[in-house]
Image: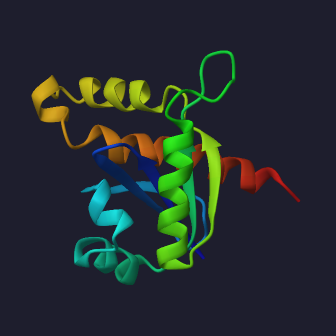
Amino acid sequence: MRVMGLDIGKVRVGIAISDPERRVATPLCVLLTNDVVNCTPSFSHVLQDWEPELFVCGIPYTLKHEEGSQAEAVRKIAGEIEAKTAIPCVFVDERLSSQEAKRSLREKGLTEREMRGKIDMIAASVFLQAWLDTQLVQP
């Protein structure tokens, strides 16, 4: 069963996917939020190609482990995606995933301009991998 990570933003959604054994998360693509919510062909093709059975959606938390100001909007968008696709959503803490993605891209020598469009999908893979790792340790 594949799991798809969604880093939901106002404008873009970063997408990552797990392998069938749910051990490794891989960055996949970045799509416009409206395309994902409306299941346009670009998102429909991603779903058909990868056949996820679960969405892992990042929720922005503060450093005090409280839901950030964007959490309500993310939950609403995730609910719309879930309703249109009939694929259930679970939520995880995405705190610092974008910073980790930027750090990783800087280490590869990318400039700020080159990073645009990549950060969201890498952030999705960061929190998806963290979620996958917690699933592996459970009996």
- At horizontal 16% and vertical 29% (from top left) the residue drawn is 110
* Residue at the farthest right position: 139
Image quadrant in which the N terminus is located: bottom right
Residue 35 is drawn in which quadrant? bottom left
- Horizontal and vertical percent for residue 56? 57, 56
Residue 130 locus on image (x, y percent): 61, 43
Q: Is residue 99 above or below residue 49?
A: above
- Do we see residue 19 in this rendering? yes
Residue 119 lies left or right of residue 51; in this view the side is: left
Task: Please name the colour scheme applied to the rendered image.
Answer: rainbow
Rendered position, 35 above or below 87: above
Rendered position, 25 above or below 45: above
Q: Nearer the viewer, residue 22 or 29?
A: 29
Percent position of residue 104, x then y: 34, 29
Instruction: Locate residue 15, reporting x and y percent.
Output: 38, 56
Please name the residue shown 53% across and 28% down the image.
69
In the rendered image, the quadrant that contains the C terminus is bottom right
